Every structure is written in C-alpha cells, then in structure tokens.
Amino acid sequence: MAEREQRRDSRGGNDRRDNRPEENPEFADRLVAINRVSKTVKGGKRFGFAALVVVGDQRGRVGFGKGKAKEVPEAIRKATEQAKRSLIRVPLKDSRTLHHDMEGRHGAGKVVMRTAVAGTGIIAGGPMRAVFEMLGIQDVVAKSIGSTNPYNMIRATIDGLKHETSPRAVASRRGKKVAEILRKPEAETVEA
C-alpha cells in the first residue's frame, strides 16, 4: 500500500490533467456580467456569485454559459465550461458580416440584427457586442428592443443567429445553384 502511494506521488499526484495539453486553446472568452447574490442565514449573510460568459473562436462559432459559485473565479470557470459545451456555428458572409437581416426573441427581449458594409464596425450594445466579437463579425448594426437583462439579450441574439442561413445552404435545400439564388429579380424581368 505504501509503495503504491509512493509511486503515485512520484508521478506528480493523481491529477491526470497535467499531462494533457490545454484543451481548445483557440477559444476566446468574454465576461459579460457578474452578479452578487446574498442569502440571509442565522449567522448573517452568505454571498454567492453568478457569472455570464460568452465564448467563441472568432471564426463563426459562439456559445454562452452561466455559472454560480461562492467565489468569482469558480463561477467564471463553470460558466466558461458550459459555454464551450453550447457552441453553435453561424455562417458568415465574407467572414465579416451576416448574410441577411434577422430578429431574435427570448422572453421580453427582442433584438434586430442587420448586415453592414465593410468599415461599419460593430454597432451594438454591451452583451450583444460581446457575442459579435467572439463570433468574429466585424460589420453589423444591431438594436435591442425590450428587455435590458443581459441574460435575455444574449439568448435573443443567439436565437436570431441560429436562424442565419447561407445562400449555399438554401441552394442545396432547394436543389438549385447558388447563382440562381443570388440572382436579382430585375434581371429576370429583363430576360423575359
């Protein structure tokens, strides 16, 4: 028994994570909100913390998570892990903006997102800006209508981004070519 304990200590403990490389180092994360909550007990108050984190690879994948713990770093760690598990892929136009305008809803929160020309930048409020930056969008105009709660704003933004479709996806679904999908209506009238 003592020999096994000694072998375990010589290997650096029982922690296997030391040998593994940092998993998913390509992801960036952004702390959006941190909330301190208190519970009144017989001896006084006990404080806890809730963290809201957005994670993305800045190349079309984004996710968000929330974590609660007695300490801030632990809450952020839990939120980051949950965000990495809930990643979604969003098709981007020219790797800089959205393919089309869209709306997202969650509860009383509603967000409107519009495509923008190159050089516009990210015109969006706090929590939405974090989502767009982690997604890798460079040009977008967005407006939040209704709830200002960061949780609802992020959920509404993610809801809208889930409905984003690329011309390639629409063409394959309809059995057409991308050029047919992107053709302007006035061009068809000229041909007729």
Image: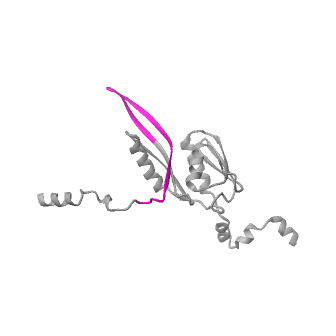
Q: Quadrant of the C terminus?
A: bottom right
Count of labels in the image: 0
Q: Is residue 34 magenta?
A: yes
Secondary structure predominantly adopted by residues drawn in magenta: strand
Q: Is residue 157 above or below residue 25?
A: above
Residue 89 lies in quadrant:
bottom right
Which residue lies at the image location 56% right of the left edge and 48% below the top edge?
130
Residue 121 seen in the current view: yes
Q: Left or right: where does residue 37 sit relative to residue 124? A: left
Residue 1 seen in the current view: no
Q: Is residue 25 magenta?
A: yes
Q: Left or right: where does residue 137 sit relative to residue 47? A: right
- Residue 51 placement (x, y as % from top left): 46, 43
Residue 13 lies in quadrant:
bottom left
- Residue 105 placement (x, y as % from top left): 62, 47
Which residue lies at the image location 74% right of the left edge and 67% below the top edge?
182
Give the residues in magenta.
23-50
